[in-house]
Amino acid sequence: MLTFTAVLLAGIASFATAQNGTVVTGALGDAQVVVGNPAGVTYVATLPAKSFFNPNDPRGNVKGSVSATSNPDGGATFQVSFSNLPTSGGPFTYHIHDAPVPADGNCTGTKAHQDPYVRGETPVCDAKSPETCQVGDLSGKHGKIESDPTTQTYTDKYVSLTPGSNAFFGNRSITFHFANKTRISCANFALASGNATQTGSNPAATSAIQVIGAGVKQGVPALSLMGALALAFAL
């Protein structure tokens, strides 16, 4: 586990490099490629029949699902499908959120985006450098939802299907948003196939040396000192 001192030193190092025009995206550096995910494992999240935003909408909820299967080259291959979108308020976004959907279905209970490297939502994700984005920012890395229906297939190399990894999403949720970030609907991931308890790599269990040396990028606003301080005091 990272110590207060290790996280604080990481933030100070990041801040120091920022003064020279070179910065990191998160208090813990860039996201690392996840290798060794258990083979054949698939998780699926399917949106419910009723919308959280407007449960009495006569058009019903957004119809959609997000499926992710372990990829032998790293991370997971996602299959995304959304339809019956709201007639206004787009383009729409979707993310892996830190917490599962509570029993009452309240999507605010899913908390913030999955963000094990403490990057934060600002600046917005640069899809050309997905390692600098929040792990859970799927639409930021792979495209917003702008047409009805929409289907997407892509590989995200920064997610884990191994329980215990900070990049693991199988115990988390998908939340679907309006462009203004209002939450429309949400759903928990559930294991659809395979053995998720198989051992894989855990790149998010980062050592202090890896933290201080990782994730150096050019031209990205520096938020890492504040992120490190927040994380350090939370430990």
Image (tube, rainbow, N blue to C red):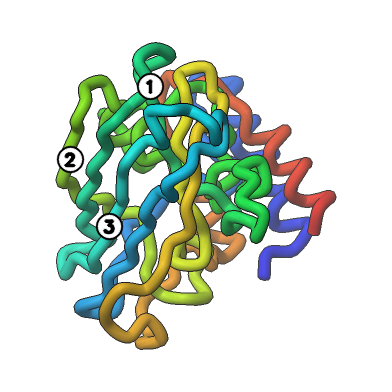
Task: Give amino acid for label 3.
Answer: Ser
Asked if residue 34 can be seen in this view, the reply is: yes
Task: Give amino acid for label 2.
Answer: Gln
Between residue 205 and residue 11, name the one nearer to us: 205
Looking at the image, the residue that sits furthest to the right is: 233
Viewport quadrant of the N terminus: bottom right
Secondary structure at numbered mark 1: loop
- Mark 1 touching mark 2, by CB under 8 A? no
Q: Position of residue 30 (x, y in %)?
A: 44, 45
Between residue 40 and residue 102, name the one nearer to us: 102
- Residue 152: give its label: 2
Asked if residue 214 can be seen in this view, the reply is: no
> Residue tagged by mark 1?
86
Viewport quadrant of the C terminus: bottom right
Total marks in image: 3
Residue positioned 48% across, 28% down in the render: 57
Q: Earlier in the sequence, mark 1 or mark 2?
A: 1
- Residue 67: give its label: 3
Residue positioned 44% across, 66% down in the render: 170
Secondary structure at numbered mark 2: strand
Height in image: 57 above or below 95? Answer: above
Q: Earlier in the sequence, mark 3 or mark 1?
A: 3
| Distance between the alpha carbons at the discs numbered 3 and 2 | 10 Å
Q: Position of residue 59 (x, y in %)?
A: 38, 28
